[in-house]
Amino acid sequence: MGRFILSLLVALLVGALIGLYIGWVQFPAQTIDSPTSALAQRYKDEYTVMVAEGYRADGDLNGALERLRFLSVENIPAYVQETAERFISNSRDLEDIRALVLLAEGVGRLTPVMQPYRPLGQTP
């Protein structure tokens, strides 16, 4: 019985060492820095909503525009307007829509479609 346990411990130790060698030396993980503009549209939308929520919280329009520059879109106000209108037409989360509409209003792109979703009493 003692010989079996010793063999098992040696086998586990050898297996762990081989696994560490393969994972760290032979085939190490490679990190690739991708630009934010390479994100899928779903994640760009989530990022835009997070920026809009930040704008709703602090009212810093320049900070919000600076954060949206990472998406490398040509026309940030038009992108915010398009995102807000897409969220409205797809019946997305109401709080997300309100945050996007507030940001769109901040960049001067409030459209009649967005009017009903303007947050009441939340003007930065």
Image (cartoon, rainbow, N blue to C red):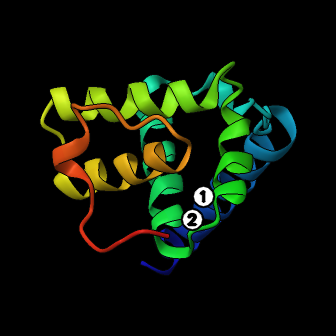
Residue 38: give its label.
none
* Image position, residue 74 (x, y; %): 69, 18
* In the image: residue 83, left or right of residue 120: right
Foreground pick, 21 / 7 = 21
* In the image: residue 93, left or right of residue 41: left
* Image position, residue 123 (x, y; %): 42, 68
Q: How many marks?
A: 2
Query: Residue at the location (29% across, 74% down)?
Result: 121
Query: Residue at the location (35% across, 71% down)?
Result: 122
Q: Which residue in the protein does label 2 denote?
A: 7
Residue at the limit of the structure toward the right, as seen here: 25
Asked whether the beta carbons under mark 1 and mark 2 sit within 8 Å of each other, the answer is yes
Q: Eyeballing the image, is 27 above or below 63?
A: above
Residue 11: give its label.
1
Q: Quadrant of the N terminus?
A: bottom left
In this view, the mark in front (1 or 2): 1
